[in-house]
Amino acid sequence: MTSLTNCARFGSLLSLVEVSEESTTAQLRRTMTTLVRTGSAASKQSSMSFMESWQTGHKEWDEKTLDLANRAISLRALLEFYGTLGGERMPHFDPAKHTTQDVVRQAIIPLSCGSSHGDCAAAMVLMGSACLPDRMVTHSWSNLFSCLVAAVVADALDQPSYEKVLRDQRLAQSELPALRAELYWKKKLDTKYWICCFAV
């Protein structure tokens, strides 16, 4: 229940950004990057109107919202993680059988447990630092984890559905290097996604 609540909070943060001529994602990234990554008084001053528009007045809540917003994972890191399933992590992983919930319990939680970033921050462990997303992913924990990863890959490849990614076995261990190379040349490998199971 906590994860759903945190996803809703992050969604609320995104929905409160004023829409202007620039995209909401670009505006959010610029403002939050200025706010979070620089500590200068001038940066804080220029970000105040944005901050005031979404702040709840509860300091801890607002700080946690910013913390959660900065827990994106790049497609590169997601594919590296996926490549360790069935080997280094979760040796019994079967992409045709294991759900997102299975992978969270058996691979993602153990990955971040006891880390310097906290027990529920796999994105921070995989990325090494905080970063804002380019995209936000919603998913079902009862669906196959391979479908979640395939959907993210399909988005990066500008495909309308993840079905082709699975059908063409693009996530097979032997195919991951070619997939990474294709995404690299399309300049999509470092696209960052906010996926709750890696962020909370």
Image (spheres, rainbow, N blue to C red):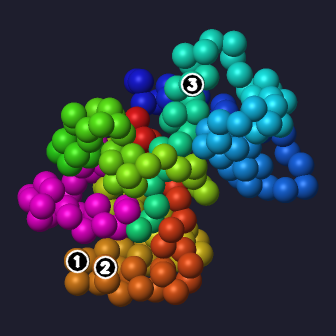
Q: Is residue 108 left or right of residue 148?
A: left
Residue at the top extreme of this rendering: 58
3 or 1: mark nearer the eye: 3
Q: Which residue is at a point 40% across and 55% down the rendered structure image?
A: 127
Whether residue 161 appears in this view of the structure is no
Residue named by callout 3: 63
Whether residue 97 appears in this view of the structure is yes
Q: Which residue is at a point 40% across and 24% down the rendered structure image?
A: 1
Q: Position of residue 96 (x, y in %)?
A: 23, 63
Residue named by callout 2: 176
Q: Is residue 98 left or right of residue 78?
A: left
Of the residues shown, which amino acid type is indicated by label 1?
Answer: Gln
Find out whether the residues at labels 2 and 1 contact each other: C-beta distance under 8 Å: yes
Q: Position of residue 125 (x, y in %)?
A: 33, 48
Magenta residues, as a range? 77-103
Residue 73 vertical placement versus 175 (above, below): above
Of the residues shown, which amino acid type is indicated by label 3?
Answer: Glu
